[in-house]
Structure formats: C-alpha cells, structure tokens
Amino acid sequence: MSAFVTLDGVSHTYGGSDGMLAVEGLDIAVAKGEFAAVVGPSGCGKSTLMKLATGLQFPFKGTVTVAGQQVTQPVKIAGMAFQAPTLLPWRTTVENLLLPLEIVPPHRQRIRRNKAEYVARAEKLLASVGLGGFGGKFPWELSGGMQQRTSLCRALIHEPQLLMLDEPFGALDAFTREELWCVIRDLHAATGITVILVTHDLREAVFLADRVFVMSSRPGRIVVERRIELPRPRDLDVTYTTGFQDIVHELRGHIVKARQ
Amino acid sequence: MNRRALIIRLSPWLFTIGLVVIWEAACWLFEIPVFFLPPPTAIAQAFVEFWRPIWRNSLFTLTTTMIGFGLAVGFGLLLGLVIGWSRTIYSGIYPLMIGFNAIPKVAVVPILVLWFGIGFVPAVLTAFLISFFPIVVNVATGLATIEPELEDVLKALGASKLDIMRKVGIPRTLPYFFGSLKISITLAFVGSVISESIASNYGIGNLMLQAQAQFQVPLIFAGLVALAVEGIVMYWAMAVLEARMTRWAQRSGFAQN
Ligand SMILES: Nc1ncnc2c1ncn2[C@@H]1O[C@H](COP(=O)(O)OP(=O)(O)O)[C@@H](O)[C@H]1O
Ligand SMILES: [Mg+2]
C-alpha cells in the first residue's frame, strides 16, 4: 500500500535558489490513519516539513505527494493547529469554529442557509473536547488550554483527512498538556484521521505516535525512524513505565547526536 | 468611594476653571498689558462682541476640515487596503510615502495656491494631505500583521487572498482604522488652519491673521479658544466612534500597547 503523505528527496530553501537550505534530501512516508511525530533540534526544518506537506511551500528538488496527488497547491484536505491558538477575538468560540466551513466547499455555499445545523455540529465537537457550553464565550474569556482545544476543533470541524499539528502544546503547563494529549489520542482513535505532530517533547511524541521521526539539525533530514510498539489504547500511566522511558532515552540520544 | 469617582469625573472641569482663574488673577496682579496677554474676561468680551464673525469663520474652518478629512478617510482606506494587500506594492510605495510625509505641509500650500488659487480648495487639500497618512499606515499595518500561522491555517483550507482579507484582514484592521481617525482629524484641522492663515479670506486662521494686523489681541485669543473647542469636539467625536465600532478590541485588549 502506498503512503498517504510522502516526501521524496525533498530539498527546500527560503528566498530563492541561492538561499540557505532549510531541509535537504528529506524522505518521509506516513500511512493513512497513522499517527506520526517529528522531533528535532529547533530550527531544523520541522515547520518547513509541515508547510511542504500541506502545499504552503514548494520544494525546488524532490516531490511531495498527498492522497495520491502530487502537491502543486495548498492541499485543502488538511486541518492545522499551531502553538499559538490564533483565534479571532471578534468571534465567539462557535463562530471561530465555523470559519473553516465558510471557506471549504461544499459548506461554503451552504453555511448561510443551514447555519443552525453547522452551529449544532460545532457545539457537538466542542463537547467532545470538554468544552460543552462554552460556544458563546469569546476567546479571551477562555484559559490557554481551552483556547488550544478550540484551535484543535477549528482544525477538525471540516472533517479533514489529515491533521497537522506544529508544537500545539508548547505554550501550555504540564497538566493541561497531558490533558490535551488524551484529547488528541481519543480524537485519533475515534476518527482514524492521519496525524503529523511536530513537537520538541519526546514524551509527547512517544505517548501519542505510531512512529517517531528524528530530524538532523539544519538543513534537516530524517536521521532516525522509530516505531512505537506500545499497545493502544495508551493510558497516561504508560509514561511512567520503564519500557516507555527506555524509548524516550533512546530518542534523546539520537537528538543529542543530531545537534552536533 | 463614590466621592472619589465624582472628583475624578469633575477634575477636568476643576482644572480648567482653576487655570482660567489663575490666568485672570496673574493678568491683574502683574498688570500684564492686554495687548500682550489678555485676561480670560477680555477674551470672553471679544467673543460677545465678535460672535458673528467667529461663528461664521468657525463653520468655514469646520467645513474645510471635514471635507479634507472625508477625502483622507476614503483615499487613506483605499490606499491602505491596496498597500496591505501586496508585499510588492507595500515595499514599492512605502518609501515614497515616508518621503512625502516628511515634507512639512506648510511648504505645499504655495504650490496648491499656484494651482487652485487661494481660499477653499487649498485649505481642503492641505487638510487632506496632512491627515491621510496615519490612516494609510494604520490600515496597512492592520492587514500586514495578520498572524502568519492563521494565514497558513486558512490557505491550507484552500482560502483565496480575498477570503483571508474578508474573514480576517478587514475585521482585524478596523481597530487600527478607527484608532487612526482621532490622530487624523486633529491633523486635518491643523492643515486647514495653516492654509487659511497663509492663503484665504475665510476661516478662523484668516480671522486671527486679520485680528493680528489690527492689533485686536483679545480677538486673536478668542480665535485660539474657538479652535481649541472645535478640536476637542472633533477628537471626542472620533473617540466615541472608535469606542462604538470596536468593542471587541477593547474588551480583548487587542492591538493595545
Ligand atoms: N519564512 C522564512 N524565511 C526565511 N527563512 C526561514 C523562513 N522560515 C524558516 N526559515 C529558516 O528555515 C530553517 C527551518 O525553519 P523551521 O522549519 O521553522 O524550523 P523548526 O520549525 O524546526 O524550528 C530555520 O533555520 C529558519 O531560519
Ligand atoms: Mg517550528
């Protein structure tokens, strides 16, 4: 079976062909429904990988394929969430969730007339991440963790096939972060969506992912690919087992090497 | 508690009255000649005596200011949207704009007079020229400071540039736009008064110039007070408009620094 997201020998530079390479000879293949995590030193090209895979940037060498199609424009089947929740402060939580639906067809044409149906859908999604009843609040009335949950919902509302997460929990405190790990874990289990998660937290990567990819420092390449065989569903307790911590240690060794 | 709030509310008035009283007292105490610094009572007298020309010329100044300001809003909004839309246009026009803004607008008045004669038109144009810059800059800034991540989120959904402008750019620019109106209207007022005092037969600027020629010092000061009142009223109107139009920005602390 061919992979759902493939980067094949991809090199990219910002600012013309004579610019410094951001990534070089990048190979990665993620299967449909798989949860992939990408870790690596800061500035190594993790965000660049995300942009290449979603068609926000185009490589000068190599090919990017998503859902069997070579990427030549923004992919339109992806939902994205970043470290900053970037919610619109003039919209309520529910209205923020409706934003993607105002852009993606066929909802784009339907949303005006079928507002109630879409609002119900948004509220249902909010309830599934523990934000039931908060739909009428404005973003600044929510805590950081709640804003990030909303941002996740916004990435999912149009039922994308691919979820791209770029250090989505980086700004949260440890407890909130672990709570959101479970939210993501359950969403992935329930929908079978393909997820690519960029993170600098190795425990996060090992807890959530089916496979962890370690990148070298700039220009980034994949130097190690590690399958995580821990059985699912995984409970937070698994993070305190020796098996788990051995994997984290092993990956940590690779990162230290990658930084040199 | 309530008393404190009351005192804070009243304090602008108390300070104004206090200033007037001190001014009056100082004029009497130090026997300052009226042709040097007239006391408030003499200025008030000038108001009573010359209320007709003051009123007429105030209206004239107000009209030129508002027309110039209106042009600045329309043109500034348009140019700001264009500049904020495209990085190429932005980098092309911005240095030009900076250069243009650096020119003291007094220096432009003679050229305007050469083209349009004295009076109404150069006053309106000076008001326009001096006041459109802050609007352009603010509108362009509002558009240019969209979070890149948010743009990525929307582009990855297949959003067009127009979608991004409509859903994000323009709404988030409104606080910047309405914030710039306060600055802009004050500048428009400066522009029209400058032009009136150089090249016009109407307006408060011209009235003050004539009063100076005739050595009617209290009338000069009365003109000044009329200008102050007009300026405060226009500023206040724009501040109220801003507060009305951008409630969400004030509540969320958006773009406040
Ligand atoms: N828009 C850009 N313009 C120029 N250089 C960029 C841009 N974005 C990223 N880079 C450079 O590309 C490299 C990889 O960046 P990025 O993918 O953001 O790294 P990471 O997300 O792993 O921290 C960095 O060295 C960064 O300086
Ligand atoms: Mg990054």
Image (cartoon, rainbow, N blue to C red):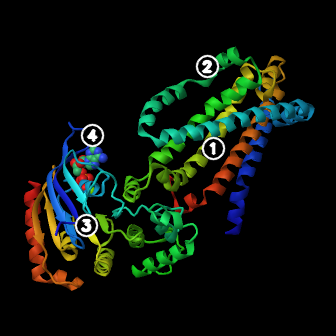
Chain of the residue under label 3: A
Residue at x 33% of width, y 58% of height: A75
Secondary structure beneath label 1? helix
Q: Quadrant of ligand 2?
A: bottom left
How packed mark 3 is, by other alpha carbons closer than 10 Å (few <14, some 14-19, many 20 or more), is: many
CA–CA distance in space, label 2 to label 4: 42 Å
Q: What residue would you read off at disc 1? A: B181
Q: Position of residue B44 (x, y in %)?
A: 86, 36
> Which residue is at a point 72% across and 43% down the rendered structure image?
B234
Left or right of residue A246: residue B216: right
Badge 2: how crowded within 10 Å, few (<14), some, or many (20+)? few
Amino acid type at circle 2 is Ala
Within 8 Å: ligand 1 and the Cβ of disc 4?
Answer: yes
Q: Chain of mark 1?
A: B
- Disc 2 on helix, strand or loop? helix
N-terminal of the two: label 1 or label 2? 2
**Residue at mark 2:** B107
The residue at which mark 3 appears reads as A197
Residue A131 visible = no
Task: Give the residue type that dot 4 points to.
Answer: Gly
- Which quadrant, please, contains the C terminus of chain A? bottom left
Q: Position of residue A134 (x, y in %)?
A: 50, 77
Mark 2 and mark 4 in contact? Answer it, CB < 8 Å: no
The reply to whether residue A40 is visible in this rendering is: yes
